């Protein structure tokens, strides 16, 4: 069949998508999401069909940017189109949905097609839903993780020991990574850390590090930074590590489908891809943390360890207090200030962030056989070695190493939220503070957010400030203040 | 947030879709498939976001045709965009995925959002997959069917008895509807029949009827045709009956997910929507039919009856022989010729098609209390009353009632496929003949297809023709002939 090209000036999600006229397509026996071979001269590709009944005429084929570029098309040019069978991986997805077990080959075939954008969103969603409902066996989780690693980029560092950490998250302000990486790297360990941006909090590690340096680093640059400084703090989304996983996360997001198997493989695949040998997983536990109780935290910890063994990777798990925010700042600039205060050892540094960072750094050092790791970690931080290392990393990542805390100014509009009674703070809500931070404009407006003056256990007097709100406009300030009155994120009795 | 409009000259699947720059969106906390309110002046709508990292710049918002039209936008115009929560129906989809039971309210909420195009394909696919894996309870199937009817158009005929039929399909050439409708309508019964186009066969009833008349009938036209003639044979896709179902079918197609609950509701919702009181469901049984054995056919039959009772609709089920094609022609024109031969009672009419049609027509008549229904149906057909009724219907649907069989010419290139041995035909493959018919170009090339000279049980001599292939080009003829040699659709022993 011959069709006349109509350009759609828009890329799809990487897939090759063509659009045919619905009436024509159906009469040709072609349905939405069917595959067609599109041929122009000696170039060809397999595309996923969408159907249109208005803008595409019977003789036309609408092509999204990816197809347009790949086939070097011109408008109104003629291409040949043949229906072809759908990818075999769809059969394996069906197998999973039907309750079957996927072999290593089946899983690789699915993940390879995910990376190559050969599957439509309908098919990807069916796969994720199938994994969620049917669950994945230990073997399947291993095959999945291996496939994700094998189909993505890997970092090839010639180091015997490579350490890494991951925190399960859900705790606002929890920027330990930016303290841990310089301590551990200053100790001489290699730590090629990739982090995420915020999903539901006022800042992710990548958003906060971006206040100080460039975090969008291609893999070659990341490689040379780590070679030079032993460490880095990069945005994971900018490197092609575990590319399949990034695509699956986008599908999981709308329905918040977090099948444990996909979550385990998602986290560990990225560690395997950078060649980690020793990984510390931090599982904060709390009513408003991702993990609610010790029992499920322990079960999860075991699953991590079991999966890691397949990759000859040592995993230790720490369970930490996830009942309230860590540090005082929430929002990229305010959190970056906290981090610099700890590294510079100022008198007003957040002690909870320092303690947790030292604990994690020392646990990581201990894993690699370093003795008296807590003393060593504390000494590295106290002596300024960690701060010097952070400056090295900031410089390597294209930032200003001599940045002063006073250079990092919070947004100009601010208002204090004060206690309406005297008493003891018995609860600081992760959810409510995160919501308020987002309402301020963080992480997009980097200098906005909250600064928390009190944590759980502290005594406050009526009228004393509990937290300060920073926003870029007066109207937003009033809005967040009214939200805060509604949420009441600190409970005082 | 303000964005500058960039038109995408393409409609999506009816949903309001906008495309934001990926980096910008993520920094604003907006993810793919999140919902945003798009405001222009006093007009606004809720759109599903897609993300782009190339063609859409940070300040731009790409809008598909539906949004462009609804908001009456201009290129480079500024619109306001606010993130808003996702529809509640997503919670109910999640509930089904998590194994919960959906209430009438939950199901209605999902189906309403399906019809209003408020759900993304990712979410729809998760719903279909969830229904497939978790199954639907009888109550859920009832709620689903009711919701599909209530959210679609309905045909309001002021008749006490309205009959209908449905065949589960999979049998090439099986054009009983086009014989049954005129018989039943000539008897004075009302039969507003909507049919589908081909999905995997050389012709669907709508494709074949289209050879004789217009089948794309809006509901008002369909109403007046049935008022006038008692019957019609229309393409179901052209009316908005069970609109939600049409959308779900598109999602079910790529993975061939046919959850029984969705299938039952899909079929009966259309019958409820036209006000049917008496419905005959024909379930052909055979190794190459959709239903393979009597046991599952009986189970399915019971499910149909049970669901129908909720709508005070009487359903009878017939089990028929689905082991081989019915009639001689396969392809719209060749099948239309078969139908006219039966209606005109020519000596060369296909007796198997006539017998099956009479059986179904008489069973339908019997359901409504008509006695000696087989005698009556036969008489209506023999006397020419059925043919006269068909001419009335053809005319009402804008066709030529006086069309002659010889006017319906098969495609000009033809070749006979002959027996290479003498013996008895013991098998005619539904799959192989359908594949060959499709390869000829049917249903798109309406005059192409196969004409079967022999059925199971007949004796053939070596060299005698088994079937004739009709195509529009010589090269296709040779191609189909070579395929036929490979498939050998008739087995002779």
Image (cartoon, coloured by chain):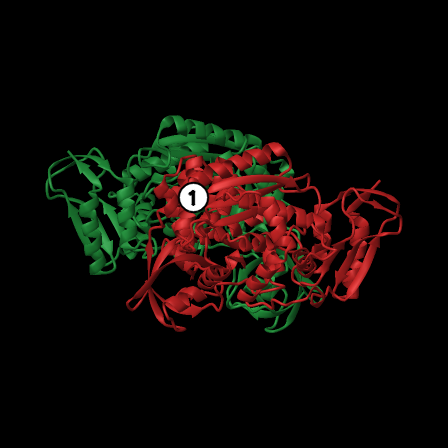
Chain colours: A green, B red
| Image position of B227 (left or right of B184) | left
| Image position of B313 (left or right of B429) | left
**Which residue appears at 13% of the width and 43% of the height?**
A464
| Image position of B209 (left or right of A292) | right
Q: From this viewpoint, is residue A266 visible? A: no
Instruction: Estimate the x, y position of residue A372 in percent, counting from the top left.
Output: 41, 28
Which of the chains bears the disc numbered 1? Answer: B
Instruction: Estimate the x, y position of residue A436 in percent, counting from the top left.
Output: 26, 48
**Which residue appears at 75% of the width and 62% of the height?**
B471
Report which quarter residue B44 is drawn in: bottom left
Instruction: Please determine whether, in this image, residue B461 is positioned above or below residue B477.
Output: above
Label 1 neighbour load within 10 Å: few <14, some 14-19, many 20+: many
Report the front residue among A114 and A218: A114
Which of the image's four quarters has the N terminus of chain A? bottom right
Instruction: Please determine whether, in this image, residue A352 is positioned above or below residue B112.
Output: above
Q: From this viewpoint, is residue A485 visible? A: yes
Instruction: Estimate the x, y position of residue A298 in percent, counting from the top left.
Output: 42, 27
**Which residue appears at 38% of the width and 40% of the height?**
A169
User: Secondary structure under badge 1?
Assistant: helix
Report the front residue among A207 and B173: B173
Instruction: Read off the residue under disc 1.
Output: B144
Report which quarter residue A187 is drawn in: top left
Report the front residue among B15 and B377: B377
Report which quarter residue B414 is drawn in: bottom right
| Image position of A304 (left or right of B402) | left
Instruction: Estimate the x, y position of residue A236 in percent, counting from the top left.
Output: 47, 49
């Amino acid at each position: 069949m011959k069709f006349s090209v109509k350009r759609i000036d828009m890329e799809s999600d990487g897939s090759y998508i063509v659009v045919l006229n619905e009436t024509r397509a159906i009469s040709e026996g072609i349905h939405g999401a069917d595959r067609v071979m599109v041929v122009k001269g000696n170039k060809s590709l397999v595309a996923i069909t969408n159907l249109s009944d208005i803008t595409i005429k019977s003789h036309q084929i609408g092509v999204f940017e990816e197809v347009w570029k790949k086939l070097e098309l011109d408008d109104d040019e003629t291409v040949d189109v043949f229906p072809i069978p759908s990818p075999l991986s769809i059969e394996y997805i069906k197998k999973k949905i039907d309750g079957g077990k996927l072999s290593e080959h089946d899983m690789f075939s699915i993940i390879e097609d995910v990376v190559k954008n050969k599957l439509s969103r309908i098919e990807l969603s069916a796969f994720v839903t199938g994994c969620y409902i049917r669950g994945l066996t230990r073997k399947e989780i291993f095959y999945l993780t291996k496939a994700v690693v094998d189909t993505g980029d890997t970092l090839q560092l010639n180091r015997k020991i490579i350490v890494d950490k991951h925190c399960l998250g859900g705790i606002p302000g929890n920027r330990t990574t930016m303290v841990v990486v310089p301590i551990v790297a200053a100790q001489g360990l290699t730590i090629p850390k990739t982090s995420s941006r915020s999903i539901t909090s006022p800042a992710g590690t990548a958003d906060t590090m971006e206040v100080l340096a460039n975090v969008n680093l291609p893999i070659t640059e990341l490689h040379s930074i780590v070679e030079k400084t032993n460490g880095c703090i990069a945005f994971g989304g900018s490197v092609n590590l575990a590319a399949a996983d990034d695509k699956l996360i986008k599908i999981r997001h709308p329905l918040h489908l977090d099948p444990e198997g996909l979550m385990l493989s998602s986290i560990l695949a990225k560690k395997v891809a950078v060649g980690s040998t020793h990984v510390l997983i931090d599982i904060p536990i709390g009513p408003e943390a991702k993990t609610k109780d010790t029992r499920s935290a322990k079960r999860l910890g075991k699953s991590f360890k079991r999966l890691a063994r397949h990759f000859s990777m040592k995993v230790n798990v720490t369970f930490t207090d996830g009942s309230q925010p860590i540090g005082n700042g929430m929002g990229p600039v305010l959190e970056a200030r906290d981090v610099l205060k700890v590294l510079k050892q100022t008198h007003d540094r957040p002690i909870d962030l320092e303690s947790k960072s030292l604990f994690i750094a020392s646990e990581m050092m201990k894993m690699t056989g370093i003795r008296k790791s807590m003393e060593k970690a504390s000494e590295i931080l106290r002596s300024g070695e960690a701060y010097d290392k952070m400056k090295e990393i900031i410089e390597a990542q294209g930032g200003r190493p001599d940045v002063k805390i006073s250079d990092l100014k919070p947004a100009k509009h601010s208002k204090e939220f004060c206690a309406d009674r005297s008493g003891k703070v018995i609860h600081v809500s992760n959810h409510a503070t995160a919501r308020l931070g987002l309402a301020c404009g963080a992480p997009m407006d980097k200098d906005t957010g909250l600064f928390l003056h009190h944590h759980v256990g502290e005594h406050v007097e009526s009228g004393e400030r509990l937290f300060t709100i920073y926003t870029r406009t007066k109207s937003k300030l009033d809005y967040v203040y009214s939200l805060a009155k509604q949420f009441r994120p600190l409970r005082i009795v």
